[in-house]
Amino acid sequence: MKELEQIHFSTRVSFRNWLEVNHNKSLGIWIIFYKKHVNIECIAYNEALEEALCFGWIDSLIKRIDNDQYARKFTPRTNKTKWSEINKKLVTSLIKEGRMTEEGLKKIDIYVKTGSVNWENNDLKNEKHKKELDVPDFIIKEFAKNEPALANFNNLAQTHKKHYVLWITSAKREETILSRLGKSIELLKENSKLGLK
């Protein structure tokens, strides 16, 4: 399989312009993000995510490049129903703001598209959703790189799973997220629960 291209976007406008041309013909890209100390103009992660959602794309894996930069994978969404709560709220706002494209609207639940049902109250597997923890895809994909870690995570009680998810997702900066993902994998390899941080 061809290696995905790595691209640096200085602004959200430049990424949106790229998506307008490539959203339906690219298999995905790695967006390069520079850390704050580098002082290179760079699209913010939340801006990249919003523009990606507008075109039916989604983010997933993170990889470290060096001490100054890292990359995050963005690809066309293939699963139309599995959405994190954060992305549901983002898309709802993007729809209200009129920023979603036709391609982006194709990738969302028909009930939300028509406005007939509030997404948060969608009755599709509603009872199951109440009981199951919503684990972001990027966490699962990182854990999946280490089979024992993923297996031990899946075997944890919901409460302990939630501790890991909240600890990782509460980080404000991407480098902190990466660090916490790495520490979580090391703990899970040893089948350890997350202590107070």
Image (cartoon, rainbow, N blue to C red):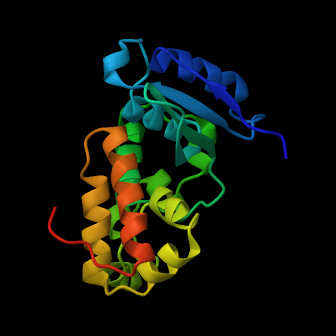
Tell me where residue 123 appears, x and y as whole percent.
40, 76
Name the image quarter holding residue 93. top left
Q: Residue at x 58, y 74 (%)?
A: 147
Front-lying residue, 145 or 55: 145
| Numbered label tally | 0
As drawn, 159 above or below 134 = below
Please state which of residues 176 and 108 is positioned toward the viewer in this rendering. Answer: 176
Q: Nearer the viewer, residue 51 or 75?
A: 75
- Relative to 64, does residue 99 appear above or below in the rendering? above
Placement of 98 over or under 153, stated as above or below: above
Image position of 56 (left or right of 45): right
Residue sitting at the far left: 196
Camera-side residue of 4 and 147: 147
- Left-right relation of 122 to 197: right
Residue in the image at 42% along x and 87% along y: 155
The answer to whether any part of residue 42 appears in the image is yes
Residue at 25% of width from left, 70% of height from top? 163
- x and y percent of residue 129 in the render? 38, 78
Q: What x and y, as percent, mark residue 95?
A: 42, 40
Q: Residue at x 31, y 57 (%)?
A: 168
Q: Position of residue 78 (x, y in %)?
A: 66, 56
Q: Compared to 45, does 92 lie above or below?
A: below
Quadrant of the rendered image containing residue 112: bottom left
Residue located farthest toward the right when viewing the structure as drawn: 1
Q: Is residue 118 visible?
A: no
Left/right placement of residue 160 relative to residue 134 reads: left
Left or right, 49 with respect to 102, comes to left
Figure quadrant of the C terminus? bottom left
